[in-house]
Image: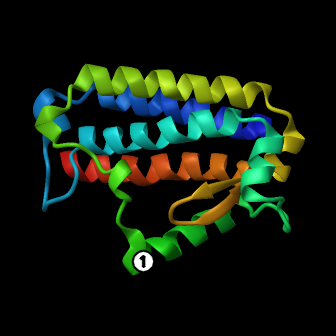
């Protein structure tokens, strides 16, 4: 996928997710099943994730190369990245790192979490709309479960990660 295609997918996904969430009532958005996160907790987790990604992708490329090195491989395909993520989720290390864990659902404010998430996604989309295609394949960024990812792969991950948690949200309100 090229930059424009990634941007289109992330943008459409965000609009659809926000429309879906707006239809949930307060009981649904806080509902937990079988010890799993509620819809709002899933959104809090996605918010915490994107709050780390946004400043990271904006750092100058030379600083990122200094910190994480240069890529020694081609970018994985979207499907390849998804497969790698699913394999890692099956492992023992699949639990979200502490800093990405969601807060207690009833302590979260729906409007605050969703507004902040929307703002963060808009920032990410704005950046993706400006970044040069070449930077996506020559910049590495760390991921707690997947290791070093090319920036393009990180954007693939952001898309799939949202799908993964949206599916969890649907199960929590069913």
Occupied quadrant, residue 60: top right
With 155 as the anchor, is 52 left or right in this view? Answer: left
Tag count:
1
Residue 174 visible, this angle: no
Q: Position of residue 5 (x, y in %)?
A: 74, 39
Residue at far right of view: 134
Q: Is residue 79 above or below residue 23?
A: below
Residue denoted by label 1: 90
For the rendered model, the colour scheme is rainbow
Q: Residue at x 21, y 50 (%)?
A: 172
Q: Position of residue 138 (x, y in %)?
A: 85, 51
Decide which of 140, 28 is in the foreground and name it: 140
Q: Is residue 139 above or below residue 127?
A: below
With 146 as the anchor, is 5 left or right in this view? Answer: right
Q: Position of residue 153 (x, y in %)?
A: 69, 54
Q: Residue at x 71, y 35 (%)?
A: 59
Q: Position of residue 100 (x, y in %)?
A: 37, 49
Q: Is residue 49 above or below residue 70?
A: above
Element on which disc 1 rests: helix
Q: Residue at x 68, y 59 (%)?
A: 149
Q: Residue at x 69, y 32 (%)?
A: 58
Q: Is residue 113 above or below residue 53?
A: above
Residue 44 visible, this angle: yes
**Mark 1, residues whose alpha carbon is within 10 Å: few (<14), some, or many (≥20)?**
few
Residue at far bottom of view: 91
């Amino acid at each position: 996928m090229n930059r424009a295609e990634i941007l289109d997918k992330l943008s459409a996904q965000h609009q659809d997710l926000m429309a879906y969430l707006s239809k949930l009532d307060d009981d649904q958005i806080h509902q937990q099943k079988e010890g799993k996160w509620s819809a709002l907790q899933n959104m809090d987790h996605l918010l915490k994730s994107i709050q780390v990604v946004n400043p990271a992708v904006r750092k100058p490329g030379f600083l990122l190369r200094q910190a994480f090195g240069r890529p020694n491989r081609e970018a994985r395909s979207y499907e390849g990245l998804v497969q790698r993520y699913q394999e890692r989720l099956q492992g023992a290390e699949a639990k979200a790192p502490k800093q990405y864990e969601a807060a207690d659902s009833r302590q979260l404010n729906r409007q605050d979490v969703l507004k902040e998430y929307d703002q963060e996604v808009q920032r990410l989309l704005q950046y993706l709309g400006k970044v040069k295609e070449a930077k996506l394949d020559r910049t590495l960024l760390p991921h707690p479960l997947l290791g070093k990812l090319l920036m393009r792969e990180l954007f693939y991950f952001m898309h799939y990660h949202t799908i993964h948690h949206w599916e969890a949200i649907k199960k929590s309100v069913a």
